[in-house]
Amino acid sequence: MATPATPITLRTARPLEGLRMETSGPPGPADGLVAEHLRLLGATGDGRPGGRFTLSGRQSGAGAVTARTTWGDGVVDESTVQAATGVMAVHGRRDGGPRGLAVDYAATATGVLTVQALLAGLLAQARGGRVPGAEVSADRAGLLAVSQYLAAAGAEEGEAAELAPGGPPFTTADGTHFELETLDPGGWAAFWRALGAPEEAIRRGWRPFQFRYATACAPFPPVLHVIVRASPWERVREAADGSGVDVCPLSSLARRAAEYDGAPPWKLAPHEASYAGATASVDAPLAGLTVLEAGRRIQAPLTAHLLGLLGAEVVRIEPPGGDPLRGMPPACSGISARWLALNRGKKAAEVDIKSAADRERLREMAAEADVFLHNWAPGKAAQLGLDHEDLAATNPALVYAYTSGWAGRLPGAPMGTDFMVQARTGVGEAARPADEPPAPSLMTLLDVLGGLLGAEAVLAGLLLRERTGCGVRVDSSLLGAADVLTAPARARAAQGLDPRQPAGFRRPLRTADGWIALPDHAAIPHDLRALSTGQALEQLRGRGLAAVPVVADLADLLSTRSIGRDAHGAPAVPAPWSFV
């Protein structure tokens, strides 16, 4: 429980100080990332290659906690995980067929989830429970990454927007590739009118543009691309300035490497408080803790969803009348399947943040909570009197979590949404091999990874509070997610090397009735298009190649890989960690 702030001696600024990291066993996904994050959080140790991580230390009074990483059932590396979990299918929608991400997306997510498991185990021990070990697999991380798309594939009704090839980025007459962002249909229309686009194309283009976050594709009328290709960049920029939309040229990994400030993907800022944690045994790492979530879209809601899976009671702050995205098609039992993928099991409280009385009610709720989480636009929390300082005044032991777009680290940056951050940080270059033009993925890579990093940051903040009695502000961002995802490619760019993967990298192979994927760097076999998928797999496996069929339709996953159904009948992927 929180008590009024009193001066205390800050014993540690990082939650894992006093703990030693040991690694063992065969290598697993993202071993280097796990070791790096544990060191950033204060652990010591050599972090030698190995997929089994143990944290222990007499100074902390904690018992050992272990987490093991694996690729999963029937898969052996990043390529086969992307193929088997639907990542290739979703990423490839823009192109009309499955495509592999050239970045190690599933492995990166697995690494962050592994750090979460270790933090959760230590937190459970500190609160009187016991979670000695966990296993995290890359195939479950892949399923989590596509959970919204998978939920829509298993809904009672079809998609409200067309699933067909197409989408940004756009290319100007002078060769500038750029992303466009606006949440306002009026701004969208004004931009295109300024460029001379036909009214019918403007009208027809808004819906696929608006739904691209949900569908991972945006089949615009082709004339919109034609209009841009006839316009120089300066004219495009002037049209954007005049209409209030944001445009962002695709940046390179070399540029991001040159400006990279070396900041960790999250920031923990403890402050003086007096907090006495629970001493009774808990049956889940976060059991008995309350999270208030004022989140929109994906990033913050996914953070809160993960905290809920770890046992916290999550209360979602929604506007009067409820979150309008509850009704976003397709639905299960009248509720959006995509919304359920991120928000099932949460409680809800309707709060009008424009009302002084309701803002005061929210402060009172925060006074009794353990975590307050939001992803409002920069400056909005302070404007509402709901920033960290405001809420810590009545609850100094609060873990105040802000999941933002840019974390204030790039002055003059565009709107902090997934695709704009991808464009500005070189993700579009890293995600595609050298024989494809750079393009941000229309799969919400950074929203999902940003949500994972947000949960990692909150768990670190809760553990720091438990060990020191300090309240903590934690900040994470989509920019941090982009930097974590592109770290290997950015490092190559910083050395003056080609940061991109070779032509054809992770491109599935066609069969007579589908697609197959080979492990990374496997020798490409002869043409398989005359063989069925089953025949091709039999032939390749007979040669010792661990090929897998590519999931091209997410509906095919619904009866496999432990996909369940929630109380509304919506598909529900399994929790990404297995605790023992």
Image (cartoon, helix red, strand yellow):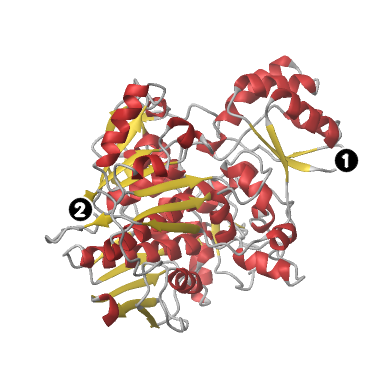
| Residue shown at the point (45%, 48%) measured from the top left | 146
- Tell me the kind of residue under disc 1: Asp
Mark 1 secondary-structure assignment: loop
Up/down of 161 relative to 50, above or below: above
Image position, residue 108 (x, y; %): 50, 63
Left or right: 579 in relation to 549:
left
**Is residue 382 something one can see in this rendering?**
yes
Left or right: 435 in relation to 310:
right
Mark 2 secondary-structure assignment: loop
In the rendered view of the protein, which quadrant contains the C terminus?
bottom left
Up/down of 21 relative to 511, above or below: below
Up/down of 518 relative to 421, above or below: below
State the residue in front, 420 or 397. 397
| Residue shown at the point (37%, 77%) measured from the top left | 52
Nearer mark to the viewer, of 2 and 1:
2
Image position, residue 232 (x, y; %): 86, 34
Mark 1, residue position: 174
Q: Residue furthest top?
A: 199
Which mark, by number, is residue 287?
Answer: 2
**Is residue 86 something one can see in this rendering?**
no
Bin the neighbour count of mark 1 within 10 Å (Cα to Cα): few under 14, some 14-19, many 20 and up: few
| Residue shown at the point (64%, 54%) measured from the top left | 427
Which mark, by number, is residue 562?
Answer: none
Image position, residue 317 (x, y; %): 34, 33
Name the N-terminal-most of marks 2 and 1. Answer: 1
Q: In the rendered image, which quarter is residue 17 located in? A: bottom left
- Tell me the kind of residue under disc 2: Ala
Image position, residue 520 (x, y; %): 58, 69
